[in-house]
Image (spheres, helix red, strand yellow):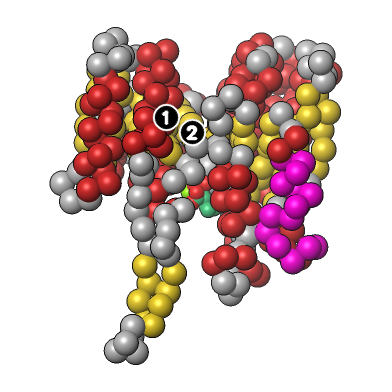
Amino acid sequence: MSRDILILPGDGIGPEIVAEARKVLEWVNERYSLDLVLHEGLVGGAAIDAHGVPLPDQTLQAARKADAILLGAVGGPKWDKLETAIRPEKGLLGLRSQLELFANLRPAILYPQLAAASSLKPEVVSGLDILIVRELTGGIYFGQPRGIRTLDSGIRQGYNTYVYDENEIERIGRVAFEAARKRQGRLCSVDKANVLEVTVLWREVMDRLASEYPDVELSHMYVDNAAMQLVRAPKQFDVLVTGNMFGDILSDEAAMLTGSIGMLPSASLDRNNKGMYEPCHGSAPDIAGQGVANPLATILSVAMMLRYSVGSNEAADAIEAAVSRALDAGYRTADLAEAGVSSVGTREMGQAVLDALAEA
Ligand code: IPM
Ligand code: MG
């Protein structure tokens, strides 16, 4: 049975890193006879330029039809002046919400070869393996009402709404408990229950779920403390579960522990494990078009796609092992290279992974 893969390169470094990930995907497609059919589409600023909107109908239709989506990154200074409703980011957020991709999995794993690239001491991060489970279609990102209004006093006021209902909390909680069950069995739920009612409810629902998962040890942590613990003693964590905005922030922080945000892949899944796969980093307009961006987070996102949406652990393992061998061989993009050490570009890193695949 053939499967449809929609590729959305997006903006900034998106097209460069996705080109390398696509080569890797094509290679494993052949080698493991996966029967994947690849299509490309426009999203974000690229779609605004071509069609005037960040998420054109044809892209949304293609995304609905696809079995999985690979996305690069969206956004850039060119579109920064647009109002929030039609910014490139709305393309990404629209896909997440229209396809109900509520479960965002962001694994932060330290490759031993990169211990020196982390901003923390090697002994603090060596062996690091954390999974952040971020709620992706609710919370303050989507809450209504929202906007900027002018008060009677003439002063303008910006406002957003932080809201979660029990069902939304429960479904992300279940994903996190299930994930913890397959790992070390420890789940830390991150909230701000000392201040925000919405997270008082969050905590209550997580506690209720815990009785159904007696094999998982649940703990709770306030988000400010979690941010601190991530840089103080990150290895205390196995799985973290949190809301949309806290997850956005903590996953960037966790990424840096692994040496570079250029290493962090992600999967955004619906209730049937249909997914969109993207690197956690953004479109990096400052280095776009220079051929220096790190393609590994996108290549590792392909591995996650093969594991979760295609069901080929074999191909996923092969890609992850090839990334590790490319690092063993000393290949480093600029974000990973230690001072004074020469680095390779996007294409060389992609080629190093392809070579490692072919040699295996
Ligand atoms: C991410 C990004 C997005 C987010 C932006 C680009 C809208 O930062 O995937 O973490 O905030 O979710
Ligand atoms: Mg982010």
Residue, x 71% and y 12% (percent of image)? Answer: 360
Whether 51 is among the magenta residues is yes
Give the extent of the magenta segment.
50-63
Residue, x 78% and y 63% (percent of image)? Answer: 51
Q: Secondary structure at mark 1?
A: helix
- The reply to whether discs 2 and 1 touch (Cβ–Cβ < 8 Å) is yes
Q: Nearer the viewer, residue 91 or 316?
A: 91
What's under tag 2, amino acid-wise?
Ala
The image's mark for residue 103 is 2
Indicate the quadrant where residue 78 lies: bottom right
Whether 309 is among the magenta residues is no
Query: Most prominent secondary structure in the magenta stretch?
Result: helix
Q: Nearer the viewer, residue 194 or 71?
A: 194
Residue, x 75% and y 35% (percent of image)? Answer: 65
Residue 116 % position (x, y): 42, 34
Q: Residues within 10 Å of mark 1 (few under 14, many from 20)?
A: some
Residue 140 % position (x, y): 39, 53
Q: Secondary structure at mark 2?
A: strand
Residue at label 1?
Answer: 171
